[in-house]
Image (spheres, rainbow, N blue to C red):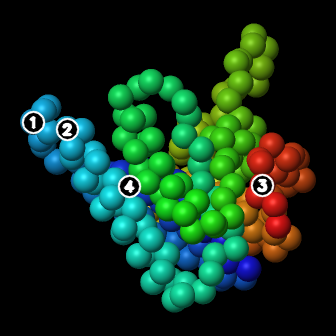
């Protein structure tokens, strides 16, 4: 079983994979250059292709030609913030390539990923609720560090999210690489998994 988890970003894409129980992870990206406003969109177009190439090269380097059974990608939120357009650019570049390859791809909403990793997702707090949990990015990273001891301080929440995405894929294929409490598994049913 080979699963790849991707937390996509032009500046820092988290990549995590497993071959059976062997887990690996890395991060690739393209720093944001200073460009004139007139060149900004052209720059995003160029950088999305660069990052997609780095991403697929990193996967190939680890898998050495072996096929991927399942790709699990965090689904971008559909909002209109300017930064979201850069995320959409890399998302469609990678997703389009995987569709061209006829790869099996699962898209996981951010709230579903949090529910799997942490046991809770975003919700409106009411008077009398227990104290708010730590900030999601920090909590996801802390949980990943506990579950994947090989995750060092050199990595950030992008890699942590990719590890959780990969873990969900492995769980779905019946070969979990990490143990999560039973209550967290409810999140698995909220993902549209590709047919076997």
Mark 3: few, some, or many residues within 10 Å (few <14, many ≥20)? some
Mark 4: few, some, or many residues within 10 Å (few <14, many ≥20)? some
Q: Which residue is mark 4?
A: 12
The reply to whether callout 1 and callout 2 are in contact (CB within 8 Å) is yes
Q: Which mark is residue 148?
A: none
Examine the rendering and report whether any part of residue 15 can be seen.
yes
Q: Quadrant of residue 73?
A: bottom right
What's the distance in space between the residues labelled 1 and 4, CA to CA? Answer: 22 Å
What's the distance in space between the residues labelled 2 and 4, CA to CA? Answer: 18 Å
Q: Which residue is mark 2?
A: 40
What's the distance in space between the residues labelled 1 and 2, CA to CA? Answer: 6 Å
Q: Is residue 128 above or below residue 172?
A: above
Q: Which label sits in the foreground, 1 or 4?
A: 1
Indicate which disc, 2 or 4, sits on the residue closer to the N terminus. Answer: 4
Q: Which residue is mark 3?
A: 193
Find numbered disc 4 in the image and state the secondary structure of the residue it sits on: loop
Image quadrant containing the N terminus: bottom right
- Residue 165 in the figure: left or right of residue 128: left
Examine the rendering and report whether any part of residue 119 can be seen.
no
What's the distance in space between the residues labelled 1 and 3, CA to CA? Answer: 42 Å
Indicate which disc, 1 or 4, sits on the residue closer to the N terminus. Answer: 4
Q: Going 51% across and 89% down the picture, which residue do you hit?
A: 64
The reply to whether callout 1 and callout 3 are in contact (CB within 8 Å) is no
Q: Which residue is mark 1?
A: 36
What's the distance in space between the residues labelled 2 and 3, CA to CA? Answer: 36 Å
Residue 24 spot, x, y in % from top left = 56, 76
Image quadrant containing the C terminus: bottom right
Depth order, front residue of 11/99 = 99
Q: Going 69% across and 55% down the picture, which residue do you hit?
A: 106
Depth order, front residue of 184/60 = 60
């Amino acid at each position: 079983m080979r699963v790849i988890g991707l937390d996509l970003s032009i500046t820092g894409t988290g990549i995590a994979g497993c071959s059976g129980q062997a887990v690996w992870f890395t991060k690739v990206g393209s720093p944001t250059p200073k460009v004139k406003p007139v060149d900004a969109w052209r720059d995003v177009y160029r950088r999305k292709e660069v990052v997609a190439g780095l991403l697929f090269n990193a996967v190939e380097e680890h898998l050495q030609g072996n096929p991927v059974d399942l790709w699990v990608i965090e689904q971008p939120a559909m909002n209109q913030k300017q930064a979201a357009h850069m995320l959409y650019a890399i998302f469609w570049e990678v997703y389009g390539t995987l569709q061209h390859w006829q790869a099996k791809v699962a898209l996981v909403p951010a709230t579903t990923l949090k529910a799997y990793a942490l046991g809770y997702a975003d919700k409106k707090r009411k008077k009398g609720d227990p104290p708010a949990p730590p900030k999601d990015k920090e909590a996801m990273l802390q949980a990943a560090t506990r579950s994947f001891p090989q995750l060092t301080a050199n990595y950030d929440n992008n890699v942590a999210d990719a590890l959780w995405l990969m873990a969900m894929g492995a769980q779905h294929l019946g070969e979990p690489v990490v143990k999560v409490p039973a209550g967290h598994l409810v999140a698995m049913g909220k993902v549209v998994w590709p047919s076997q």
